[in-house]
Amino acid sequence: MLDLLFETSWEVCNKVGGIYAVLSTKAKTLQKSYKDKVVFIGPDLWTDGHESPYFIETKTPLDSWVRQAVLPAAMTVRTGRWNVPGKPLVVLVNYHSLFPYKNNLYADMWSRFGVDSLHGYGDYDESCMFAYAAALAIESMVKWSGAQRVVAHFDEWTTGMGLLYVKANLPQVATVFTTHATSIGRSISGNGKPLYDYMAGYNGDQMAGELNMQSKHSLEKAAAHAADAFTTVSEVTARECEQLLERRPLVTPNAFEQNFVPRGEKLPHARVGARECLLRVASSLTGVQYAPDTLLVATSGRCEFRNKGIDLYLDALNSLRFTLGRLSSVERRVVAFVLVPAWVQAPRADLADAVAAGRTSRLFNPVITHSLHNEDSDVIYGKINYLGMRNDLHDRVHVIYVPSYLDGRDGIFDMTYYDLLPGLDLTVFPSYYEPWGYTPLESVAFGVPTITTNLAGFGQWVLDNRGGNAKKSGVRVISRTDSNYSDAVDAIAGSMMNVYMMADTEMRRIRTHARGTGRLASWTHFMDSYTVAYLQALACAKSRTESMITHDYDSYL
C-alpha cells in the first residue's frame, strides 16, 4: 500500500509528553506492516554532552541518502533508529540554520494558506522552523528514493508549517494531519472558561483573538483544512475540532504497545520491586513505617492543574483524609503520589541520604521529594499547603509531591515511570480537558485500576466499548461537566474509599479485568483506523496528480 511513510513530531526521540508515548508504542506495529518504509522525524536538540537516550546513531538504509543530500542553508540531519520496540528509522533535523529565512517562509504561508504568523510568540518560531526543516528533509528523501506512494503524517500544530510546505511543493505526497488537542480548545479550558456547556457557541477565530492565540490557531486550522486526511484521537475531540477548526476529522484512537508491559511472572515481580521503592521513599520522607498493605495511589502527567484534574484529585484526597479520620476502627494508610514534573531544582539531598541509608526519618517539609526553583508559586505545592496536608502522623492519607521526570535518573527513586507504575494499587486522572488520556490507558495496561472521566477520550471509549461497570473493566469513569466539580470530588473520594475497603481477592480480579481493557486498546486493534486515513490521503494525492497531468496535457494541446 505504501512506498514510504513519514511521521513528524516534536516528540520523536524527545520524551516531553503523551505524544511520545503514542508514537513510540505505535512504532512496532508500523514496522511490522511497513518494514523500514517508516521514517520518524524529530528535532535534533542534543549535544555531545547531553545525547538523547532514545536515539541510536547507527548505519541505516538512509545512509546513502545522507551522503548525497544537499540540504538548504547548511541544514544538518542525523539518521539512526529509535530505541523503542520495533527500532524504526529516525531522522533528527537541526533546524537552527533556517531562522534567517523565517520571514520569507511566513510571508509565503500567508499568501498561500492565510497563516497569520504576525502574532507568534513563545514556542511558535522554534516549532515552525523545526517543521520547515522536517519538510525539507522529506522533500529530499522523496526525490532521492523515487517513491510513488508516499504519506507524510504530521502531529500537532507544532508541525503544521511542514505539512503546508509539503502540500505546496510536493503535490504527489499524501498528507495527514493529527491534532491531539486543539490549541484553542486547550487555551479556552486552561483559562478557566466553560468549554463544554458553551461549545456550540464558540468561534475558534474569535476566541483565538481574545486569548492571544491567533498564530497557533491560524496555523493549526490551515493545516487541518489543507491536509488530505485530518484526524484526531477521540470522539470528544472530534466535536471540538468540528466546532473550533471547522472541519470534521476522522477518529484514530491512541493505543498502547503491550511490549512495554512485563509479561507472565515478570509483572508480579515488577510490582513487588516498585512497591518497595515507593514505600521506602515515603518512609524516608515522612518518618512513618508503612505496612505492606498500604494503599498506593497516584496521578501523573503534565502540570495542567485544571485540565488534568490535579485540583480535583487533591480535593478528593482531602475529603478521603477527613472520612478516614472519623473512622477510629481503620488502621490502613493511603499514600497518594502526585507524579507531575515541574520547575525542579534538584533532588533533596537529605531525602536522598535517608533513602540510601534505609532510614525512616521525618524530614522537614515531608510532602515533596525534590526542591523547586519556584516553591512559592508552584500551584500543586500551594494547593497541598492550602489544604493543610502535612502528612501528620495521625493522618490516614499522606500526599507526596514528586515534581521530577521519572526517567530513572531523578536522584530519589532512580526508577522510570513504567518501572514504578506496577507498584500502584490505583491511579486517578479526573481530567477536565483530555483529548485521549494516555495515562489511564497505560495504567490498565499494567494491570492498575484507574479512575478517569467522561471528558477524556479514553474514558468515553471505555463507556462505549466496555460499559460503566468498573469491576468488569478496571476503569471507573466519573461524570464531569462545567458545573459539577463538588459532585465529582465526592464521586472520586467515594471510589477511592471503595478500593480502600476492597478485599484482596476482588482487587486481584479487577487488576485482571484492567489488563483485559488494556489489551483491547492495543495497536493491533486500533491501527485499522490509521490505514483508513492513509488510504484517504493517498486517494486525494492520486486525484490531484492526475488532475495536474490532465491540465498539463490540455495546455499542450
Image: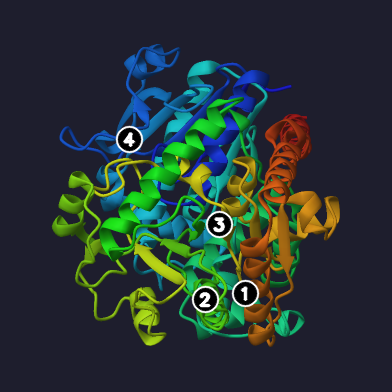
Q: Are marks 1 and 2 in contact (CB under 8 Å)?
A: no
Dot placed on the residue nearer the N-terminal end, 4 or 2? 4
Tag 4 secondary structure: helix
The x, y position of residue 279, in whole percent, is 38, 52
Measured Cα–Cα span from mark 3 to mark 2? 37 Å
What residue does disc 2 label?
306
What residue does disc 1 label?
493
Q: Nearer the viewer, mark 1 or mark 2?
A: 1
The type of residue carrying mark 2 is: Arg
The x, y position of residue 55, in whole percent, is 36, 29
Quarter of the image for the N terminus: give it.
top right
Measured Cα–Cα span from mark 4 to mark 2? 43 Å
Measured Cα–Cα span from mark 1 to mark 2? 18 Å
> Which image quarter: residue 389?
bottom left
The type of residue carrying mark 1 is: Ala
Of 377 and 365, which appears nearest the observer? 365
**x 57%, y 57%: residue:** 427
**x 51%, y 78%: residue:** 321
**x 25%, y 38%: residue:** 46
Q: Using the image, determine if residue 382 lies above or below residue 156.
A: below
Position of 482 with respect to 74 (left or right) is: right
What residue does disc 3 label?
112
Tag 1 secondary structure: helix
> Which image quarter: residue 228?
top right
Q: Taking the image as drawn, is residue 285 in sight?
A: yes
> Dot 4, crowdedness within 10 Å: few (<14), some or many (≥20)?
few
What residue does disc 4 label?
72
Tag 2 secondary structure: loop
Dot placed on the residue nearer the N-terminal end, 4 or 3? 4
Dot placed on the residue nearer the N-terminal end, 1 or 2? 2
Dot placed on the residue nearer the N-terminal end, 3 or 2? 3
